[in-house]
Image (cartoon, helix red, strand yellow):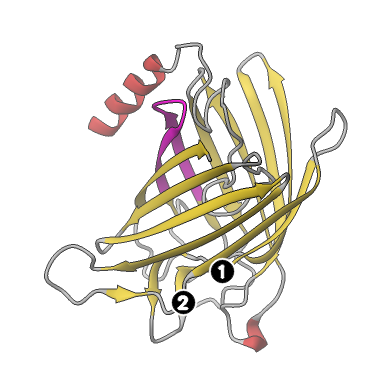
Amino acid sequence: MKIWYLLILLITLSQETFSQGSSGENARYESVYIVNMPTAGIIPKNSFTVYANIFENSGCFAEINASPFTNFNLGLSFGGTNILGNADVTWQNLPGIMIRIRIFDESLKFPAILIGFNSQGRGSYLTNLKRFQNLSPGFFLSASKSYTWKLGSLAFHGGINYSLEPSPSDRIPNYYAGIEQSIGNRGSVNIEYNSTFDEKPGLIMDKRGLLNLAFRFAFTQNMTIELQFIDLFKHSAGGQRAVRRLGIEYVDTF
């Protein structure tokens, strides 16, 4: 119940009118992820983001992303599990690499189109399988289109991706889609469906299909936090309940 009280408080605070972070009707920046999967959003030229995702088993990864040119983002990330406590830390084997190139900006009739590569998965890195709990997008093509209606700003996102983490024989194109609805001037709710066609049932997930949810709130002009609920369908092996994760994003110029 405390989580819902917090959400109500954040929504109430979100009625302030000045432009903020990357969530809400008056968002200052575009969102670059639906929840786990990429949108066609991009940070402006001469800007950078620092993003941290805190997940189960005392895990965390940090990502830094910069935009030296218009419609071009480049970034690195790294993380591990058991970072707090007295157990041995398990680091991912290689840093994540991110490249994002927007080839078409959004227009009145057509969505924004972006191509890119992202080798950073989500959740724990599984050393024995040489992969993340939630596969990295790998190569991807994403599209985003936003609208304004009586409930605020509504954006539709979707894409196709090809992850390099599965074994070569299991690598196939995967599809994902999601929506992003503003809540007041500072908040938003994001819903994402990842088909996980590239997952082999019985390994990490009992069934294909990953439904994720995120509540976002922009505290300042530069900082946005999000509370994520991963796998609402409980398709992970063992039918475990949805996983709660926390994201913190800071955007600024250089």
Q: Which mark is residue 109?
A: none
Tell me whether circle 1 and circle 2 mark residues in contact (CB < 8 Å): yes
Question: Which residue is drawn at the image coordinates 57% and 73% (left, top)?
Answer: 199
Residue 94: assigned label? 2
State the mark number for residue 119.
Answer: 1
Name which quarter of the figure residue 6 lies in.
Answer: top left
- Region of the chain picked out in magenta, as a range: 212-229
- Looking at the image, which residue is at 86% across and 37% down? 110
Rendering coords of residue 137 (x, y %): 60, 64
Q: Residue at x 51, y 33 (%)?
A: 189
Q: Position of residue 76 (x, y in %)?
A: 51, 62
Mark 2: secondary structure? loop
Where residue 138 sits, quadrant-wise, is bottom right
Q: Name the amino acid, label 1.
A: Ser
Q: Is residue 198 above or below residue 19?
A: below
Observer-nearest residue: 168 or 32? 32
Q: Which mark is nearer the camera, 1 or 2?
A: 2
